[in-house]
Amino acid sequence: MSLNSEFSTMTLAQASEGLRNGTFSSVELVRAMHAAIDEKDSVIGAYLAFDAEGALAAAEAADTRRAAGEYPLLLGIPIALKDMFNIKGQPCTCASKILEGYIAPYDATVITRLKAAGAIPAGRLNMDEFAMGTTTEHSAFQVTRNPVDPTRVPGGSSGGSAAAVAGGLALASLGTDTGGSIRQPASFCGCVGVKPSYGRVSRFGVVGSVSSMDQVGPITKTVEDAAILLQAIAGLDAYDQTTVNQPVPDYVAALRDASLKGLRIGVPKECFLDQTDPEVVTKVRAAIDACADAGAEVREISLPHTAYASAVYSVCAAGEASASLARFDGVRYGRRRGAAEDGLQALYNRTRAEGFGAEVKRRIILGTFVLSSGNYDRYYHRAQQARTLIRRDFEAAFAHCDVLMSPTTPTPAYLLNSKNDDALQASFDDAFTVAANLAGICGLSIPCGRTKAHLPVGLQVLAPAFGEVALLRAAEACRRELGV
Amino acid sequence: MKYLVTIGLETHVQLSTKSKMFCGCATSFAAEPNTNVCPICLGYPGALPAMNREAIKLTVLSGLMLGCDIQAWSKFDRKNYFYADAAKNYQITQADQPLCLGGGVDIPVPGGTNRIRIHHIHLEEDVGKSTHHPRCSGIDFNRSSTALMEIVSEPVMSSADEAIAYLRALRQILVYTGVSNCNLEEGNMRSDVNISIRPEGTETLGTKVEIKNMNSFSHIHAAALYEIARQERVLKQGGTLVQETRRWDPDLCETASMRTKEDAQDYRYFPEPDLLPIVLAPEQIDAWRLLLPELPEDKRVRFVGQYALPEYDAKVLCAQLPVANFFEEAVKLGAPAKAASNWIMTDVLRLLGQSEQDIIDVPLTAEAFASLLKLVETKAINMPVAKGLLDELFETGGDPAAWVKERGLAQVSDTGAIEQFAREVIAAHPKVVEDFKGGKQPALQFLVGQVMKLSRGKANPQMAGEMIKQMIDDR
Amino acid sequence: MSDIKSNVHIDVARVCELAHIDLSAEEQVEFQSQLEVILKAVSKLDELDLTGIEPTLYGHPIESVFREDVNTPSLDLEQVLANAPARIGNEFKLPKIVE
């Protein structure tokens, strides 16, 4: 039974070592996971589904392989997944009613790679519907609570992933980040979340909405765990022509001698203005100061277009999403609504009206509007131009900085149901995270302390595109310095 | 009031690729419904397109054959609209930066050729197919995401005949280059026909009517004629034309208005973010250029030099590449070049035009044609016999040398025999002989004709003429 | 430079037609005001001078990625039809499409 209690704080690396040493089996590990979910998920609500039988069967197979002498790092490790990955034979809901009944006939590439590494996809996690939101409150099915304080939101859209990891209900998970959807919930829940560079990880089989910004990434307890997962899923994929043909470095090995000495850290002043909670400022500045004390060269920089990033994101993301979500129409899969005698248009209109939640509908309407004739030049084209300015801000910053450090979010987690009337809340939450998606660079959030109310504060680290080694090393060295 | 006609064609050509434009499904025709589909061409959640290099190559080859400018940079866009046969409710196409710009097709017209200019060529994916059942519709996505090359002409055709000549020429070039089967029954080549009319003397084009999705060339011709007449009728009666899409009904032989959609379509084009731009280096285009069969212009120049043909001949022969091939084959097999050119330009093209066939479809082979011309050159047969044989070869094919032997068609050039015929004819027509002596040339032709009759068409007409003249003079 | 509009009107009903979503009357009103709040925030971009700035169209500046023309396995018919909300024979069944 001690495995059950150890499970909640166990890291992926520790689980791997335990399996290799024979301290426990994969079957026992999955059972411990199941027990944790049974015990705590009724409060947290991270899981939409957990197929214990399937996971145990895979665990048995992994144990057999281990007995035969195979020891890959991820063999027999259960990984929980935000419910937007196609896993063959399983439902994939994206926390939406419109995909009721859909059974995936294929595996997403990241799932194929996890399986090839011996990992076990275990459990589907709650999220904001179609990844649109920053609180997971826009799920069509259930509420997920922040495990640190169940009266508060876990963040979003990968709220279930962060809550499961932080709440001890999963060793590690995969989420997606379009405007901050990995980093922001990691920040709110007090765990690690990594958004790889655009093109680093395949999006094939991931139900995306914003093709030019979506990335799959790990949400874990430690930077090391994130490196292990990223290693397994990164790399060129013929099925996703936006993936980049660059070799995948050994991220885990790169962490070993991570050091802050001589690391040039840029601190964007725009992230420390009035909108940022003073306690967040305090904790983040303290973390950066600790890095300076350990030998890093810290300098203040400017990302002059930070204030425009949310507006650019709103327009570009909504535009792309409005087209990407057009396929959900009740014709080929999902639940169809509307009476046949009312014709095809009614079928579309009713299926989508009843199948989509309010936030999704709002974004589709916004996106359709900014692309429409007469509005394209004024909104979409201009936003794409402004996006270029944001990329240039980072290029200029990285000309004399190795990494940038800032708060991940302006505030810590807030109360559930407290921002329902604020149409701009999501933009506010994502104020410091969206720019990285617009520019295609990599970034992550690590915990850097707690507020007086014991709420997690997240430190965001950003690095240039395909600079994951520098990113992970800086984060690991900082973490060691902070002792978190 | 005379009206000028303007026709523009948008022709969709299914490219001969093994796999679809954006996925690896097979492109075979007539498979069972929904058996050549995958998450990508079904628009499943999470699926991403992956562009097919071969489709790009074939489009570039087509552009090179048609004299287009191949664009160094082009991209795909999303064309957003909801429809039953659209798997994603957007079509991936090229909106404003296509692969090829400009170019044109030469069509044969009386007296030479006319160049029909092309506006651009772009690549896109095809949609699925809907079947109408008694109380519902059924969708088959086998065709969804097949590579489709769209060739958009300038609106410069001025008659239904020109439109068909353009399509014929286009089809020949595409088949010849190997980019598509252009099988009309299978729907490999479908055209949207845009027609407008305007009063003679005005410049502004009239209201454009579109007839969508037509395969058969004869249907296109009939539909165009009908629509032109309909538009004239409307205007002459003082009505106005509506810019609309119409459908050709082959049974009723008329175009009918399609139920107009609620509002004008707003396609909300934007660049496709799942696919990167297509950048073609000059080296790549040059490498593909080597795969081309000889371009029409180069062939014309070569014909003039190699076969000592006048430019006019070369132009006519090369207007249809299969005809040019036929010519060269025949010459290789021994036909005299100028004679072959003459025969093709006059008789062969005439026969093809009358039967509305292409040279690749008729039984006449280059071999038979060469054999025929050699028989004429060696004076083994006379012209009238030769022309008759050509007609027959055109219908059924065959071996002319064998026929000459079997049927005793050899030209009679034996002076003795001709002398005999001439003597008989002169004796039988004293009045005509007098007419000839009086200076009437047609009288001679009459007498030669009589010799031909007596000889059952086999006499050498030139010799007969000479003989008759000599005999009359000797009198 | 485009003029700065502080109040932007969006014809939600028309946009819903294009997006093929039926909104109730209440939703239309609610969304109308929410979207106008968002568009007002978006109009902050009007402040920027974007003359001569190239738009960013893609997530990463790579180009010319192609796939070879080879066949890969298609889905089994039964898999396809299992997800179909309605079928007729082996086709996806839809209300009769009138053209």
Image: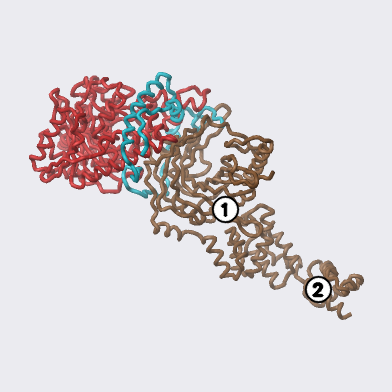
Q: CA distance from mark 1 to mark 2?
A: 48 Å
Q: Is residue A453 placed above or below B222 in the rendered structure?
A: above
Q: Label 1 belongs to which residue?
A: B116
Left or right side of A387 for A5: left
**Amino acid bearing label 1:** Ile
* Picture disc at residue B359: none
In this view of the protein, which residue sits in the foreground, A398 or B14?
A: A398
Left or right side of A239 for A18: left
Image quadrant where one finds the C terminus of chain B: bottom right
> Measured from the top left, where is residue B67 in percent x and y?
50, 56
Q: How is the image coloured?
A: by chain
Name chain C's colour: cyan
Determine the secondary structure under disc 1: strand
Chain designation of label 2: B
**Amino acid bearing label 2:** Gly
At x 79%, y 67%, the residue is B457
Quarter residue A58 falls in = top left
> Measured from the top left, where is residue A88 in percent x and y?
35, 34
Determine the secondary structure under disc 2: helix
Left or right side of B92 for B397: right
Name chain B's colour: brown
Quarter residue A96 falls in = top left
Chain designation of label 1: B
Image quadrant where one finds the N terminus of chain B: top right
Quarter residue A75 falls in = top left
Q: Is residue B461 placed above or below B82 in the rendered structure?
A: below
Labels 1 and 2 within one chain: yes
Name chain A's colour: red
Q: Label 2 belongs to which residue?
A: B465
Can the viewer see residue A51 in this picture? no
